[in-house]
Amino acid sequence: MQSQFDVTNIVQQKPPAPPEANPGTADLLRQILEVQREQLAQMQATAAAHDTSGRWRALLARWREEFPGLPEACREALPILERAYGGILFALAEELRQNGSDALDNDFALQDFLDRYGLRLGQMGNIVNLVAPLAEVAQQQQQQNESS
């Protein structure tokens, strides 16, 4: 049994030198970074403008002494309002289900339907949409008090 081993010297080649950076590349990267910072600032401002609970917290902070129990009262009233709103929606849906697809097929039926449900539903929806953010702020304040 014979074996043959061939041994060769491996000469490592030096990696090629990186090309010299173009002075315009660094300037371009700085401009991109500046634009990204501006976009971030704009997105933060947009998010702050759409933070409705922040606006309600500010309102409550301004009127805390005059209306100290407002957030808690809204938190307690919200389920009652939601139930009433749900009741109106249920009655509306139930009537449409019972009367079938031709329930609103003429002007008289449509006007009668809107007279019975439209105004009440719209007003209850507005009230719920006004009370809910205040109740949410009260819930957040309660959670903060419990965690601290």
Image (tube, grey):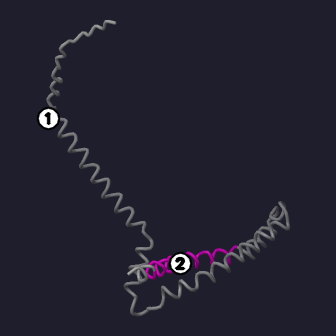
Q: Which residue is mark 2?
A: 130
Q: Position of residue 128 (x, y in %)?
A: 58, 77
Q: Nearer the viewer, residue 24 or 4?
A: 4
Q: Residue at x 47, y 91 (%)?
A: 69
Q: Residue at x 15, y 32 (%)?
A: 21
Q: Which residue is mark 1?
A: 23
Q: Residue at x 34, y 61 (%)?
A: 44
Earlier residue among tags 2 and 1? 1
Residue 45: quarter of image: bottom left
Residue 103: quarter of image: bottom right
Kindly give the residue lying farthest to the front in the view shown: 1
Prevailing SS of the magenta stretch = helix
Residue 55 vs 15, above or below: the answer is below
Residue 147: quarter of image: bottom left
Q: Mark 1: which secondary structure?
A: helix
Query: Looking at the picture, which amino acid does disc 2 mark?
Result: Leu
Q: Position of residue 81 (x, y in %)?
A: 63, 81
Q: Mark 2: which secondary structure?
A: helix
Circle 2 packing at 10 Å, graded few (<14), some (14-19), many (20+), is some
Residue stretch rendered in magenta on the structure: 118-142
